Amino acid sequence: MSNSFANVKQSHVFFDNSPGLKKYYEDWATRYDVDLADQKWVAPRIAANLVHLLASAYGTPDTTVFDAGCGTGLVGSVLRSLGDYVIDGVDLSENMAAEALKTHAYRKVYGGVDLSVPRRDDRLDQYGIVVSSGVFTLGHVRPTALLTLIEYALPGGLIAVSTRGSYAVETGFEDFAGSEKVAAQASLEFRLRDAHYIAEESADYWIFRKTGTSR
Ligand SMILES: C[S@@+](CC[C@H](N)C(=O)[O-])C[C@H]1O[C@@H](n2cnc3c(N)ncnc32)[C@H](O)[C@@H]1O
């Protein structure tokens, strides 16, 4: 088993243990990009291209993007290569957030923000597009964190989320996405099924629209 494969696997054991997961990423931050590239990590590229598609189809010149669980900033880096986007990001890990800042793709990045806590950080705005790549995965956040992401979207805004295949099965993400709790706040626009994600397995990419209109 390669080190990179083992390092990804070891990140999957921290469900309901935010301090443990945070520590894991604090220690992994400077080696994360190399390990993930070794594992054919294409989720950030797909997520960024989805944001670009959504912004092209529905955005306005002042549409801003929120990268939830931005990690080292891979989504922001790809997105800034596609257009002149204003992107803010947060991450549980301070060191991952520090790596994201170094990309210069983001306007603001805050570490130490836990998306499992169902409250929007009051340092941040609401956004036309919220994106989350690789966060709805084993040992990371429960499906209920989707409600936090919806909170960060403007009324009528879009939320793009990847779900690793085995995570979606284990956590019942599809049932939660179809639940009354979600339906009260957002609707599913479309879903890319069984798309590329990482070498070991595929993922679904979900696009929700928050109820209401900002106009
Ligand atoms: C697999 S990495 C994905 C990073 C980046 N989005 C990408 O696509 O490369 C998962 C990220 O989610 C962050 N994370 C995990 N749980 C979180 C939580 N509860 N709140 C905020 N960030 C979290 C981790 O610190 C890590 O940076």
Image (cartoon, rainbow, N blue to C red):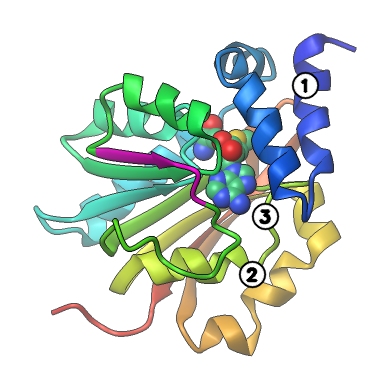
Residue 141: mark: 3
Q: Nearer the viewer, residue 43 or 190?
A: 43
Asked if the residues shown at circle 3 and circle 2 are in contact, with their CB atoms under 8 angstroms apart, the answer is: yes
Is residue 200 visible in the rendered image? The answer is no
What residue sits right under mark 1 in the picture?
7
Q: Earlier in the sequence, mark 2 or mark 1?
A: 1
Is residue 162 visible in the rendered image? The answer is yes
Q: Nearer the viewer, residue 159 or 138?
A: 138
Residue 197, given in percent of the width and then of the height, sits at 64, 35
Give the quarter of the image for residue 48.
top left
**Residue in the picture at 43% in, 61% down:** 159
Residue 113 vs 184, above or below: the answer is above
Q: Earlier in the sequence, mark 3 or mark 1?
A: 1
Q: Is mark 2 within 8 Å of ligand 1?
A: no
* Magenta stretch, overall SS: strand
Q: Is residue 91 magenta?
A: no
Which residue ends up furthest to the left in the rendered image? 61
What residue sits right under mark 2 in the picture?
144
Residue 164, given in percent of the width and then of the height, sits at 71, 46
Label 3 is placed on what type of residue? Val
Residue 177, given in percent of the width and then of the height, sits at 63, 73
Q: Which residues are magenta?
A: 108-113
Label 1 is placed on what type of residue? Asn
**Residue in the picture at 75% in, 15% down:** 4
**Residue in the picture at 76% in, 33% down:** 11
Q: CA distance from mark 3 to mark 2?
A: 8 Å
Q: Is mark 3 within 8 Å of ligand 1?
A: yes
Label 2 is placed on what type of residue? Thr
Q: CA distance from mark 3 to mark 1?
A: 18 Å
Ligand 1 position by quadrant: top right
